[in-house]
């Protein structure tokens, strides 16, 4: 009996330890997000984009993730990092500015702002290196500058990718985001799904190739998870509305911990980006967020068991 209890105690302790290890082990050491403004699902699939198409083949892919409304830039870029849509964040249009009068967010931090993934990382991993390089200057106001180590605006898409690559090489950040704006420009100026629009996606593809090369050169390829995201698609020369062309956006998960050649079934929402990053790093998220991790993209995790409840 004594031996039995002793063995049981060891067994229980072993189980507890393995659970603790499972809970505290991060899925990846680095998360790199590349956001392509105005990239639609149809545009990504039709463009000459060998790097992105290879990432789809070798990673996990959600062809039609859903924007928040309006399908505008600020409401969607903010949803990704603030863990919820405009009704939660108060970022209802591109006119939003942090110090102007605007809709009150559901939850605010000490300076009156919705808590972002950058804040969560800074609070729970104070030593973490995190940064952002953005091509659209208005991206910068969506996050609290003091929360990141590196905060840089670049005038062109090529310069943005170059600065971002240099940052990765120099600092090997735990979390970093690159924003590219030129695909959105092509959509507005020449029209979505025109040859010029598709060519702009091909340009983004080659710049992303450069960033992936920088990740490899920095020696962190094997420990990095890369996400490709977009804010909205578009129709004719605009966006902001509710057509499939505007609200369907692709998400690619690629690298450390990600399933290979996997097509994600669960619905993926714009605001799920924040909780997915927190999930990778084992961080606690604010209750106010509606964001949920897209666990199905990662090895060892299944599609939600209630995926088809109510659908039959
Ligand atoms: Zn946009």
Image: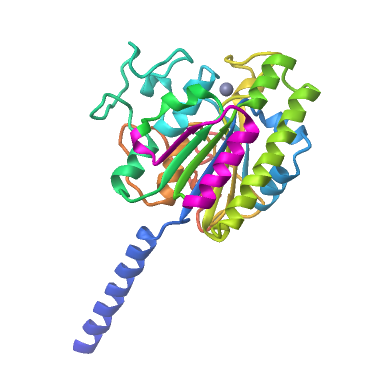
Q: Nearer the viewer, residue 70 or 229?
A: 229
Q: Quadrant of the C terminus?
A: top right
Q: Quadrant of the N terminus?
A: bottom left
Q: Residue at x 63, y 25 (%)?
A: 38
Q: Which residues are magenta?
A: 146-172
Q: Is 29 on the left-hand or right-hand side of 44?
A: left
The stretch drawn in magenta includes residue 152 = yes
* Image x and y of residue 294, in percent: 50, 43
Q: Residue at x 34, y 14 (%)?
A: 103
* Numbered disc total: 0
- Res. 270 visible in picture: yes
Q: Residue at x 36, y 30 (%)?
A: 144
Q: Is 183 on the left-hand or right-hand side of 95?
A: right
* Image x and y of residue 182, in percent: 65, 26
Q: Please tell me whether the stretch drawn in magenta is mainly helix, strand or loop.
A: helix
Q: Is 49 on the left-hand or right-hand side of 300?
A: right
The stretch drawn in magenta includes residue 169 = yes
Q: Nearer the viewer, residue 303 or 216?
A: 216
Q: Nearer the viewer, residue 68 or 225?
A: 225
Q: Looking at the image, which residue sits at the far left?
A: 2
* Image x and y of residue 278, in percent: 40, 45
């Amino acid at each position: 009996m004594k031996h039995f209890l002793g063995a049981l105690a060891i067994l229980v302790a072993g189980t507890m330890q393995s659970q603790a290890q499972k809970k505290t082990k991060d899925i990846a050491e680095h998360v790199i997000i590349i956001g392509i403004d105005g990239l639609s699902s149809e545009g990504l699939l039709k463009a000459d984009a060998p790097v992105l198409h290879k990432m789809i083949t070798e990673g996990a892919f959600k062809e039609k993730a859903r924007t928040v409304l309006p399908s505008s830039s600020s409401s969607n870029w903010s949803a990704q990092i603030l863990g919820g849509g405009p009704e939660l964040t108060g970022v209802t249009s591109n006119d939003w500015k942090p110090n102007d009068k605007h809709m009150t967010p559901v939850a605010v931090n000490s300076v009156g702002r919705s808590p972002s993934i950058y804040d969560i990382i800074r609070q729970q991993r104070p030593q973490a290196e995190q940064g952002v390089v953005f091509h659209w200057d208005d991206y910068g106001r969506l996050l609290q500058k003091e929360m990141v180590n590196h905060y840089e605006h670049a005038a062109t898409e090529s310069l943005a990718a170059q600065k971002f690559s240099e940052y990765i090489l120099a600092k090997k950040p735990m979390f970093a985001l690159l924003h590219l704006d030129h695909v959105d420009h092509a959509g507005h100026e020449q029209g979505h799904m025109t040859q010029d629009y598709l060519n702009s996606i091909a340009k983004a593809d080659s710049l992303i190739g450069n960033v992936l090369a920088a990740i490899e050169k920095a020696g962190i390829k094997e420990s990095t998870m890369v996400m490709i995201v977009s804010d909205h698609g578009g129709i004719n020369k605009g966006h902001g509305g509710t057509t499939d062309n505007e609200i369907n956006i692709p998400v690619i998960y690629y690298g450390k911990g990600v399933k290979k050649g996997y097509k994600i079934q669960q619905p993926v929402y714009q605001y799920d980006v924040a909780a997915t990053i927190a999930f990778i790093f084992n961080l606690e998220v604010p209750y106010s967020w509606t964001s949920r991790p897209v666990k199905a993209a990662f090895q060892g995790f299944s599609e939600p068991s209630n995926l088809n409840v109510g659908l039959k």
